[in-house]
């Protein structure tokens, strides 16, 4: 049984703390919202009067706060816990914050001889309740191994991404991808609608192509990630099809901002002499010019 301080028991932190307590650990919680802490009493989670009390004498201190400034404030603000953390305490920040802030915080803690792991989570509250979060972890091997049994109580997929800060970096890269392609997905369906297509049929068609399947399971490993830039589908042809889409959208009055930006990038790649390379060479072009 480990002694665990859990700071920030909101939407996500509350079910996560419950799962740790259910796993047989001694959990003490602190939140600026005292009611959120009190609501955990039935799980055997003890309240702390201050963040420093929750942090003192623990094997692990976990934070689950909104953003970077909350984590910085928790550690180094006027009532910061950095001095309350013992040298044997592993500090685990599970908030989604800027990886640059994580690295700065970790370095400041390291100066005091305290280790830190960042472990932001993917998925939603329901997964937190079920202990089925995806947890992306950054930290030293030994620290990650030490905290893994605790993380296993909160998630069913634990991925060690590299040194401290890498968990947050992975989460941001992943979210950038899924959030950005959502724009293209929305614009594609609107274009289809304006063209009079059956949207459900369009979705089914796209599930059979890279549009719906994504590049990472299909074209990227087959081509550019192997260093193969020979055209399967060449940049110039992709640019031509994108031009057809942008013109079609203009004629129909459909928004296609993602398409316009993409057209610029494909045109740049073509002007740089990449026109007869595979379309995945866009990645190579954007990296190297
Ligand atoms: P939330 O606002 O519900 O909970 C945050 C809690 O932190 C609140 O109870 C607040 O009172 C407390 N808090 C803020 N500052 C504090 C401090 N200095 N000391 C003590 N307590 C403090 O937020 P959430 O939805 O639980 O999200 C937490 C983190 O998890 C965020 O970084 C969020 O981006 C991330 N996240 C959320 C979800 C989701 O679906 N809600 C999913 C994945 C990741």
Image (cartoon, helix red, strand yellow):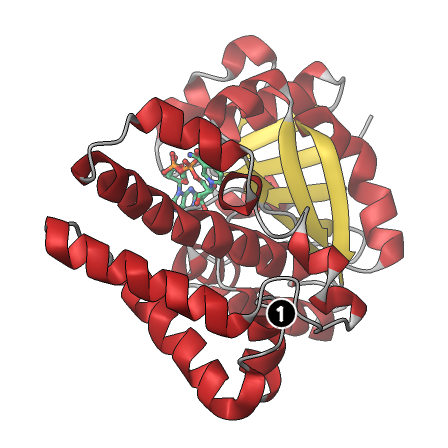
Residue at 44% in and 60% down: 68
Label 1, residues with CA under 10 Å away: few <14, some 14-19, many ≥20? many
Within the image, what quadrant is residue 56 found in? top right
From what the image shows, is residue 17 above or below residue 76? above
Q: Nearer the viewer, residue 281 or 180?
A: 281
Q: Dot 1: what SS?
A: loop
Quadrant the C terminus occupies: bottom right
Residue 261 visible, this orientation: yes
Residue under the image location 60 percent in, 16 percent down: 130
Check the image and report above or below for 168 versus 22: below
Which residue sits at x=89%, y=54%?
A: 142
Q: Position of residue 129 (x, y in %)?
A: 55, 18
> Of residues 12 and 25, which is closer to you in this image?
12
Q: Is label 1 within 8 A of ligand 1 (CB to nearest ligand atom)?
A: no
Lateral position of residue 112 relative to residue 200, left or right: right
Q: Position of residue 260 (x, y in %)?
A: 28, 67
Ligand 1 rendered quadrant: top left
Q: Is residue 11 visible?
A: no
What residue is shown with label 1? 278
Q: Which residue is found at the position 50% from the left and 45% from the top? A: 51
Looking at the picture, how far across and down is residue 285, in whole percent? 57, 81
Residue 33 picture location, percent across and down: 35, 33
> Height in image: 68 above or below 133?
below
Which image quadrant: the N terminus?
top right
Q: How many marks?
A: 1
């Amino acid at each position: 049984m480990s002694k665990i301080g859990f700071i920030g028991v909101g939407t996500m932190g509350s079910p996560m703390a419950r799962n740790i307590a259910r796993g047989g650990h001694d959990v003490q919680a602190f939140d600026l919202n005292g009611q959120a802490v009190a609501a955990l009493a039935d799980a055997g989670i003890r309240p702390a009067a201050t963040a420093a009390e929750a942090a003192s004498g623990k094997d692990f201190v976990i934070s689950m706060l909104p953003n970077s400034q909350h984590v910085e404030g928790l550690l180094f603000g006027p009532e910061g816990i950095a001095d309350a953390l013992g040298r044997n305490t592993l500090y685990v920040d599970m908030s989604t914050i800027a990886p640059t802030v994580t690295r700065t915080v970790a370095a400041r803690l390291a100066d005091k001889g305290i280790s830190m792991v960042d472990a932001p989570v993917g998925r939603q509250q329901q997964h937190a309740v079920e202990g089925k979060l995806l947890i992306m972890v950054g930290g030293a091997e030994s620290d990650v191994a030490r905290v893994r049994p605790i993380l296993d109580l909160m998630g069913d997929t634990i991925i060690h991404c590299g040194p401290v800060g890498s968990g947050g970096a992975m989460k941001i890269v992943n979210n950038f991808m899924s959030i950005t392609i959502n724009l293209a997905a929305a614009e594609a369906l609107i274009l289809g609608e304006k063209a009079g297509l059956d949207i459900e049929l369009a979705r089914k068609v796209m599930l059979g192509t890279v549009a719906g399947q994504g590049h990472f399971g299909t074209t990227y490993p087959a081509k550019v990630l192997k260093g193969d830039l020979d055209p399967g589908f060449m940049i110039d042809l992709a640019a031509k099809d994108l031009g057809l889409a942008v013109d079609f959208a203009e004629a129909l009055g459909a928004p296609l901002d993602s398409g316009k930006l993409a057209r610029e990038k494909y045109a740049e790649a073509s002007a740089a002499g990449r026109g007869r390379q595979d379309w995945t060479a866009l990645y190579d072009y954007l990296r190297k010019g």
